[in-house]
Amino acid sequence: MIFQSILFEKPEDFLDKGILEAPDFFVDLNLDQIVDTIIAGREEYNLKPFFYSPLPTIEAIKYRQEVMHELEENKILFESIKSFTEKMHTMREHLARADKLRNKYQKERWFLDAVEIYCDAVNSIVADLDLTDLRSCGLLRLREYMKNYAQSTTFTMLLAETKKLQTDLSTIEYSLMIKNNTVEVRHYASEADYSAIIEDIFAKFKQDAVKDYKVKFYDQIEMNNVEENILNLVAQLYPDIFLNLDNYYSKNGTYADQTIMTFSREIQFYIAYLEYIEIFKQAGLPFCYPEIGQDKNIYDYEGFDLALAYKVIDKNGSIVCNDFYLKAPERIIVVSGPNQGGKTTFARMFGQLHYLASLGCPIPGREAKLFLFDRLFTHFEREETIQNISGKLEDDLIRIYNILNQATTNSIIIMNEIFASTTLQDALFLSKKIMEKISQMDLVCVWVTFLVELASFNNKTVSMVAETAPENPTRRTFKIIKKNADGLSYAISIAQKYRLTYDHLIKRIRS
Amino acid sequence: MKVFLLYKNRNFNLQVKLPLNEKDLIQDLGLNALFDAMAMGDEFLFEVAKKIVLTSENDLDTILYRQDILRDCLKNPGLIRDIYTLASEAIEKEKKAHFGFFSKYPSSILYNSIEALEVFLAMLKKLRMLIAEHETKFQSEGFVALFTMLKKELSDEYLAVIQTHLNELKIRDGLLISAKLGKGNKGTNYTLRKQEYRKQSWIQRIFEKKVPVYVYRIPDRDENGLRALSELRDRGINTVANALAQSVDHIRNFFITLLTELAFYIGCLNLYEQLTEIGEHISFPLPFVSSERRHSFKGLYDVCLALNIKQKIIDNDLNADHKNLFIITGANQGGKSTFLRSIGLAQLMMQCGMFVPAQMFSSNICEGIYTVYKREEDITMRSGKLDEELSRMNSIVDNITSNSLLLFNEPFTATNEREGSEIARQIISALYEKRIKVFVVTHLYSFAHNMYEGKMDNAVFLRAERRADGERTFKLREGEPLQTSFGEDLYNRIFVDT
């Protein structure tokens, strides 16, 4: 099969061409922060649509995983591809510059440089790939394509012509005789460099290094009128070379190969993601390529929230990893425990892992098996200020209703502290109702709640609790562990710490 | 052109890093009195004296090299001061010649540099004439080499060539600049070229091969064009202006080096004159390599004390070659501290190539000179003080080598005598075994006694002398440590006699 795209095995895998809107759950899961960090500084490649489009099939995911894995493991390959894209970037800058310039010879020279960079980029990557032992389907197809292109007459002729012209131009050396307001332009005739003469005369005084008095001139890219006029006279000194330059420019307007240009954009997806996760790998955090399928027995060991970890690493803090696994009939993870204990982070992590896996990316974790969802829904408590409580409750319920209406049995739902602002009785009643629906649909779900009763709702629910340090219950470990939710041990241990238990109080209170 | 008056093969660097214990040395040995005498109120002389005295030389040849130069200076003080003044004048005049040296226009850098070079040219001529008159009076290797070099390098022909170039670069009827095509065909590598002025007859000119020349003339009213042209001219002369400005720096540096290195000898002359005035003697010491253990002297006095009280003071003799531990005990106010200071001062002075305050002095070179003195401040915070003292000791131990000199003045007294003695015993015994040369002034009797009983071959015990009538002579004699330090005497003198 002929190479078309490094991101999509089949053209139809790119579901929503040109999507500019992030999926609804992006903000809830902090995926917006993650993607913003990944693509920062790469705006020119317009990578967002790729991050907004999950892949529809296991094959499409595998195609990407293979390419990503190969680029991750083969540093030399990664560097040579990166250097290719950097050259293409420089080339585009040169073309943009050439477009803006007004002087003919200047414009043409920038164009010539752009083509030279392009040729060099193509040749280098062909040579590099030729030396690489490739396995992934995507990169194998690419190599084949690039090789054929580099051997084509179109390319080899372009290359020869470019080199010749560059060599000719670089040999030009001329002299200017400046007298009052005239400039005489002529061939340079090997007159001696005056600064060398001066250095030579005073050489005997030379001791240690001294200050550099060379004035730094502000070098504008554009030429001023005098420079332009001089260049035009230099062109008259060397008429043949400049005539060739003119012809070259008018002939080669569409030199760039479209498939290669597409590749140089799409490969940025991989480079950006791999460079992003390198930060975490440096900090000793694990990544893996999850097994993706229809099986709802899922797990990830030592996962973490990327958005949070990014901030924590920045401040040299340590990152807590968490595990989860669901084993039939388990479907619903109910997370409870103290505030600020890492519950929301866990829920976000769960969502991030599934979403990033659906993009074909490696995910936080030592080993993982995840579910290929058709839709992902989140319901997080929103900050917006709705005046009365009933309005907010109503709004919550409408949102959940809509989610359950759109969800299929292959969807994932993540809920975070819903009904927090209503009465306990109401909250419990509504939650149980919704829990029933979710169970019936056999959805994979994470539900963060303070309602410990939900943790043992039925055989589909799994209880996970945010743990605290045994020796100091006010200290959160940010570990979310499989454990029965009693809602009690935490309060008791705090009491012990402050010597407020029954036994303590009996001894302390004097009669 | 190298000055080399402090080292045979390199210049002295005034930015040299002083030893880490610089402040301790200055305070403990009272060095500022020495620097003041050398500087006589001149800040520059003070700085140079301080840097060179504290940068102890470990190289025997360098010390002897400087001693020879200093002997020449003592014989020809007038001429040395003349050369010093000339160097100082050259630097001053050039400073006045160019304000705005740091211009952003190569053309003004060029202009200013030419002017500065003309000032220097005149001073170099003067220097050469001054030397030519007197060179026969100098014997030291350093001065002979310097004067020979100046005579050779600053020939009339050479100075004339410089002048020719300066004239040519001043005003010219046209600049010849070469260039290449850079990025985007913009001119680059602008380089000023020397024009060949060939004398040709009109016939030659007619038959010379025609080379193509294209002319562009900027209209008189085109201000942007004229500005661009003048920038082009500036680009062309940029490297030449830089080369000239750097040459100014180099020549200025030559004068500064001459000034700096002479400043040390001027300081020595100043000191010599003051000591002579109060009738004190000096001599050139005899240094030994650092692996030896030598310490013998006759008539050694504390130069700083002499300078302070401006009169002849008590001196001491010692004959202690091959020894490396000196334990000094005895009467308060018996001259122990003065003695200790005189040891350190003479060592420093010897190792910078100076004369020493003694009739005779010989010692091995010490690779490090350290002092551990009781610090008077904070006497109330006893535990903290011992901690601080041991921490200073700790950092000394971090750096010390066996060929070093360590002066202790009443160490480890911030605790009771038994503990202090035990610390002292452990530390000093270790230093002794490491062959470090140690002088200890101490009142810790158990320590001193204990060491004495140890009958160490290379230890010397000195006592501040006291006559039977309680009168102190301020002389130190060899003797066993005694139990009391005669504090009673001191008490009596202060509380009873007055």
Image (tube, coloured by chain):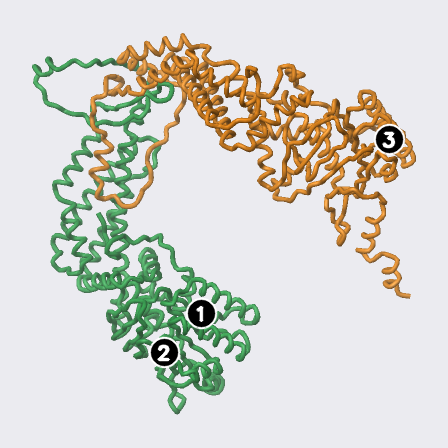
Chain colours: A orange, B green
Are the two marked residues, 1 and 2, in contact with CB atoms closer than 8 angstroms? no
Q: Quadrant of residue A311?
A: top right
Q: Quadrant of the C terminus of chain A?
A: bottom right
Q: Is residue A1 above or below residue B459?
A: above
Instruction: Give the percent coordinates (x, y) of residue A265.
Output: 55, 20
Residue A298's image quarter? top right
Q: Secondary structure at mark 1?
A: strand
For this orientation, the residue located farthest to the bottom is: B468
Tag 2: amino acid = Asn
Can residue A447 be spotted in the picture? no
The disc at residue A445 is none
| Disc 1 packing (10 Å; few <14; some 14–19; many ≥20) | many
Quarter occupied by the N terminus of chain A:
top right
The residue wearing badge 1 is: B372
Task: Quote the CA–CA distance across marks 3 and 2.
Answer: 94 Å
Please report whichever mark, 1 or 2, sits nearer to the chain's N-terminal start: 1
Relative horizontal placement of residue B380, taking residue A251 as reference (left or right): right
Disc 1 chain ID:
B
A338 w.r.t. A174: above or below: below
Would you name the residue on which mark 3 appears?
A435
The chain holding disc 2 is B
Looking at the picture, which amino acid does disc 3 mark? Answer: Met
Q: Is residue B488 left or right of residue B137?
A: right
Chain at numbered mark 3: A
Q: Is B15 above or below relative to B108?
A: below
Q: CA distance from mark 1 to mark 2?
A: 21 Å
Q: Let me know if marks 3 and 2 both belong to one chain.
A: no
Q: Under tag 3, what secondary structure?
A: helix
Circle 2 sits in a helix, a strand or a loop, which is it? loop
**In front: mark 3 or mark 2?**
3
